[in-house]
Image (cartoon, rainbow, N blue to C red):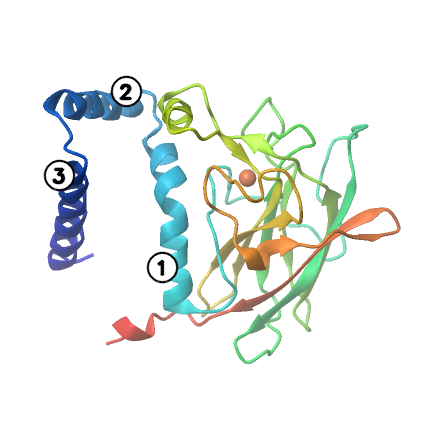
Amino acid sequence: MSNNRIDAVVSDIVNGIRQALIKHEVTFDEYRAGVMYAVKTGEAGEIPLLLDVFLNSTISDIENAAYGGTEGTIEGPYYLPDAPLISNGGEILTYDDDRNVPMIVRGTVKDLQGRPIAGATVDIWHSTPDGYYGGIHNDIPANYYRGKVLTDSEGRYFVRSTVPVPYKIPDQGPTGALLEMMGGHSWRPAHVHFKVRADGYHTLTTQSYFEQGDYVDDDCCNGVRQVQIKPDVRENGEKVIENDFQLAPDVIASRAA
Ligand SMILES: [Fe+2]
């Protein structure tokens, strides 16, 4: 990021904030309360959480417009880069649990011309049946409820796992308090995360949601995109999440030299 670009972006952010302060005639006491809120958020280690709740989905929208391909959305805080490699057709590690609903995750990875991309990495992660993540919560091992699968020569991928559930983002700190004061909540709809990579292509980060699932219409992180709301398809008792991804070249045309 050049100094000119930093100046342009930060100046516009500051001007936008100034306009909001003027519009709402924010008082000095209210301004100081805002400053103290920022201090508390930093002390609680929630600055990434707070910014992601309000702004990550906008950055995703900007990238979607700039690159093209399948519409992406927020990554969320629970991605881990070293998920285990799962064989195509294999199973993501999960615990035996009475609440488990078996799930098939499958689809294809293609380029913008519809040609299959062989050897693309499809990184998949999602919650346990009680809303936690492997490697993050409750001593669940990091290789559970997440895995990477490589597409075959026709760009296909297929893994089995279990259906995730809605969960709350951390809600006991300043971020949750602010959402509540604004009349909102800290719930996310059930979702499956994806990160799809192939050499020469822009990495696609997205999530799939379940049609008519709780909070699909009211996600605290504004992360739901229509294209990723999946119909309730079941095959032999297994829920099916099907995603045919299109990857765009890793170039922003408007900025190419
Ligand atoms: Fe998540």
Q: CA distance from mark 2 to mark 1?
A: 30 Å
The kind of residue on which mark 2 rests is Lys
The quarter of the picture where residue 213 lies is top right
Q: Is mark 1 within 8 Å of ligand 1?
A: no
Mark number, residue 22: 3
Q: Is residue 194 visible?
A: yes
Mark number, residue 40: 2
Mark number, residue 119: none
- The residue tagged 1 is 62
Q: Badges 3 and 1: C-beta atoms under 8 Å apart?
A: no
Q: Earlier in the sequence, mark 2 or mark 3?
A: 3
Would residue 57 be found to the left or right of residue 236 on screen? left
The kind of residue on which mark 1 rests is Ile
- Tell me the mark number nearer the camera, choosing from 3 and 1: 3
The kind of residue on which mark 3 rests is Ile
Q: Position of residue 215 (x, y in %)?
A: 58, 38
The quarter of the picture where residue 97 lies is top right
The quarter of the rendering in which ligand 1 is drawn is top right
Q: Earlier in the sequence, mark 3 or mark 1?
A: 3
Crowdedness near tag 2: few (<14), some (14–19) or many (≥20) residues, C-alpha within 10 Å: some
Q: Residue furthest right?
A: 236
